């Protein structure tokens, strides 16, 4: 009888300890921290992080700041991974792995009140060269054109795309029509929403969620279908950047993003997934 009581008491103790281990917040899995490309964050990452938490119980905290901020934070061990729309460069650490997870496109945005709706690539080049300073030069109202940019480094993946496709290898530099801002496409988008004379380049993934007008290029609209078909030019990849020695939970997250479910979710958010482009 005594043995039975002792066995029962011992079993109860074991169960109690197990429950404490399961529910004790002190030993809960720490959230993953990420920062970087605001185009990615608004375009897919914030939503995907919530889905990952539902499936695994692991929270992913995402903040913006731009690709360079994200990469610098990762290098300084302030975050677990970075979001980037900039490809790997010679300045990036050797142990940074750039994992392609989705597709985007460089787009050009104006305030919704602006009557200009179509441009040619050479028009965009002329804006960044400071040769177009008034919207009437593009068939719009007699209104000063204000181009929102930041420092050359701060332009991140947007600057990389502009240099590649618009400026023939040259970087974006300050001109008479420039308005220097912080290094985040999110800020440029919000300024264009509010300022009638504003202009900026950004990513399709986030611009489509803003109250702005995305300009057509040579008559082709930036839509998911047109990006996938190649009718709209300037397609570019979006990356998640991790260190080679990243902890298992980071690998678990990237595996989720690249899984059939993760890619299906990205496509459902309205941007081309990797599988959409196959």
Image: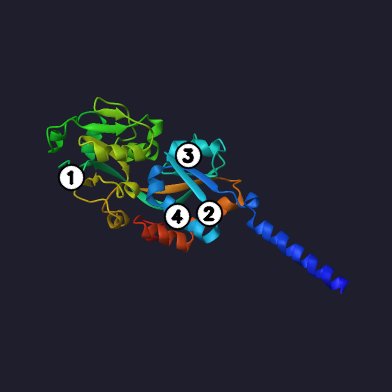
Characterize the local packing of mark 3: few (<14), some (14-19) or many (20 or more) Cα atoms within 10 angstroms. many
**First of labels 1, 3 by sequence position:** 3
Q: How far, Cα to Cα, is label 2 from label 1?
A: 39 Å
Q: Which mark is residue 70?
A: 3
39 on left or right of 240: left
Residue 105 vertical placement versus 163 (above, below) = below
Residue 7 vertical placement versus 98 (above, below) = below
Mark 4 vs mark 2: give the one in front.
Answer: 4
Residue at the location (55% across, 44% down)? Answer: 80
219 vs 26, nearest the viewer = 26
Q: How far, Cα to Cα, is label 1 from label 3?
A: 33 Å
Task: Check contact, mark 4 vs mark 2: CB within 8 A.
Answer: no
181 vs 31, nearest the viewer = 31
Task: Check contact, mark 2 vs mark 1: CB within 8 A.
Answer: no
- Horizontal and vertical percent position of residue 140: 13, 38
Q: How far, Cα to Cα, is label 2 from label 3?
A: 17 Å
Kindly identify which residue carries mark 2. 253
On the question of residue 24 being in view, the answer is yes
Residue at the location (42% across, 54% down)? Answer: 47
Kindly identify which residue carries mark 4. 48
Residue at the location (27% across, 54% down)? Answer: 223
- Horizontal and vertical percent position of residue 100: 45, 50
Name the element at disc 4: helix
Name the element at disc 3: helix
Q: Residue furthest bottom?
A: 1
Q: How far, Cα to Cα, is label 4 from label 2?
A: 10 Å
Quadrant occupied by the N terminus = bottom right
Kindly identify which residue carries mark 1. 117
How many circles with numbers are drawn on the protein? 4
Q: Which mark is residue 213?
A: none
Q: How far, Cα to Cα, is label 3 from label 4?
A: 18 Å
């Amino acid at each position: 009888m005594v043995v039975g009581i002792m066995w029962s008491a011992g079993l109860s103790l074991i169960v109690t300890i197990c429950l404490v281990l399961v529910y004790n917040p002190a030993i809960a899995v720490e959230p993953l921290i990420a920062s970087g490309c605001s185009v990615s964050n608004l375009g897919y990452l914030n939503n995907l992080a919530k889905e990952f938490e539902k499936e695994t119980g692991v929270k992913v905290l995402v903040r913006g700041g731009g690709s360079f901020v994200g990469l610098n934070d990762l290098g300084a061990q302030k975050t677990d991974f970075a979001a980037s729309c900039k490809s790997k460069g010679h300045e990036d650490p050797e142990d940074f792995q750039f994992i392609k997870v989705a597709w985007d496109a460089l787009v050009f945005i104006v305030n919704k009140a602006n009557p200009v709706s179509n441009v040619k690539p050479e028009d965009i080049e002329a804006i960044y060269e400071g040769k177009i300073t008034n919207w009437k030069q593009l068939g719009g109202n007699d209104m000063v054109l204000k181009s929102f940019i930041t420092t050359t480094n701060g332009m991140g993946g947007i600057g990389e795309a502009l240099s590649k496709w618009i400026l023939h290898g040259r970087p974006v530099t300050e001109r008479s029509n420039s308005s220097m801002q912080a290094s985040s496409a999110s800020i440029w988008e919000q300024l264009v929403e509010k300022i009638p004379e504003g202009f900026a380049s950004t990513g399709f993934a986030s611009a489509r969620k803003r109250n702005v007008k995305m300009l057509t290029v040579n008559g082709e609209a930036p839509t998911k279908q047109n990006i996938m078909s190649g009718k709209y030019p300037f397609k570019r990849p979006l990356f998640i950047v991790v260190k080679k020695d990243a902890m298992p939970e980071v690998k678990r997250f990237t595996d989720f993003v690249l899984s059939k479910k993760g890619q299906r979710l990205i496509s459902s958010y309205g941007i081309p997934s990797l599988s959409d482009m196959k």
